[in-house]
Amino acid sequence: MSAPVDMDLGGLPPDLGAWYASHLGKVDSARAAMERIVQADIPPVRARLLRSTQLGAEALKGRGGYEVRLTVALPTIIHFTFKCLLRTPQFMYGVGDAVSEQPYRTSSTRIPLSLPRGIALEQAIVSITALSRPADERRAAAAVLLAELAVAFCAYHELAHLLLGHIDAMQRWSGRARLLEMAEKTGVAHLDAKTRLVWEYEADLVAANMLLQDMMDPGVEGVFKEVYGPDAETDPLSRFQAMLGATLVVFLLISQVTPRDRRTHPEPLVRFAAIANDSAAALAEQQPQLKLSFDVVSEAVNDVALSTLSSWRALGLGTSAASPLKNLLTAQRAVERLEKHRCAGHQAYSRFARFYPFR
């Protein structure tokens, strides 16, 4: 990973510079929210952008305290990905004029996982951000909104590793107080693959919980109305679906960038099934007036999975040949195994029970 700096975003268009700067505020606002939940002080956490062209994120503990680091490539590539997806009619077909969209084709069958080389970083950001804009204005705006949610989830996931004590445990075992999110083998005697999977599972649940709190904020509905249109569905269930779609795309991207033999995270649909189950339960608990039935929530979850995976396939990015719903059932069983592992022996080096309010 490149050394972190405070980026000078003055060379970017004002709206793009503001969009980047907004991500730096996500971590501290989430930390403050967690302080209210646990009614205890949490050490300050600094959010940094890394001047790196590679997709990446990390959490670490240094002499100056905790840091959450995202590469500048992360929001850029995520934004580009959502623009590509929203140019397929299958993805978020209820937003704007989906039928008129045409898939964006590149010379590669994969989403680019790094920014263009050989030019200044700011120019690389602008060049890829300018590509693949959906024809429909509402769908173009939805790409920005979903990218915001996805990057917020990434920041919250890194913050969760810090809050849950994963970085402290890593430091005790290895002397290295950092966790990389992309293509990293554990390399630590005490940290077997099963433990790392449980850590990622825990961080996903806490990050999804934080993002759900954002989605349930009364002020958020106005943002969705502005993007989707005044007559569109922007109720809590619709915002819940937007959150799930944003996170599933993050999981698919991470699995694409990470070689299978070096993955430290559960498979994308396993991660999706875990947060879908848990967030649905939290939604029902926090919004009892909605009287959401199991069937209604299950249909909403399945709709997100089907539309996202079919769009991913339409772009030539590949998914399993098996039915997405069949894969979700298989993923559910994997989630159950992760939960058993978490309960069986991982609580000694995780503060999950303290920081997670729905357990």
Image: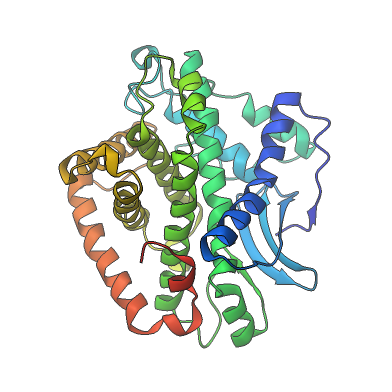
State the colouring used for the structure image: rainbow
Q: Which of the 4 quarters of the picture holds residue 40?
A: bottom right
Q: Which of the 4 quarters of the picture holds residue 235?
A: top left
Q: Along the line of sight, which residue is nearer the eye, 61 or 326?
A: 61
- Residue 187 relative to residue 259: left or right: right
Determine whether 258 is above or below 241 in the image.
below
Q: Along the line of sight, which residue is nearer the eye, 226 or 336?
A: 226
Residue drawn at 49 percent across, 58 percent down: 258
Determine whether 12 is above or below 245 in the image.
above
Q: Where is residue 4? Give x, y as percent.
A: 77, 56
How many numbered discs, if any?
Answer: 0
Residue 95 visible in this rendered orientation of the protein: yes
Split into 4 quadrants, where in the image is the N terminus?
bottom right
Residue 181 visible in this rendered orientation of the protein: no
Q: Where is residue 50? Give x, y as percent.
A: 73, 52
Q: Which of the 4 quarters of the picture holds residue 243?
A: top left
Residue drawn at 80 percent across, 69 percent down: 64
Q: Where is residue 132? Give x, y as percent.
A: 54, 23
Determine whether 176 is above or below 60 in the image.
below
Q: Along the line of sight, which residue is nearer the eye, 349 or 69?
A: 349
Q: Where is residue 349? Give x, y as percent.
A: 50, 82
- Residue 19 relative to residue 331: left or right: right
Residue drawn at 64 percent across, 52 percent down: 27
Split into 4 quadrants, where in the image is the C terminus?
bottom left
- Residue 219 relative to residue 45: left or right: left
Residue drawn at 32 percent across, 36 percent down: 237
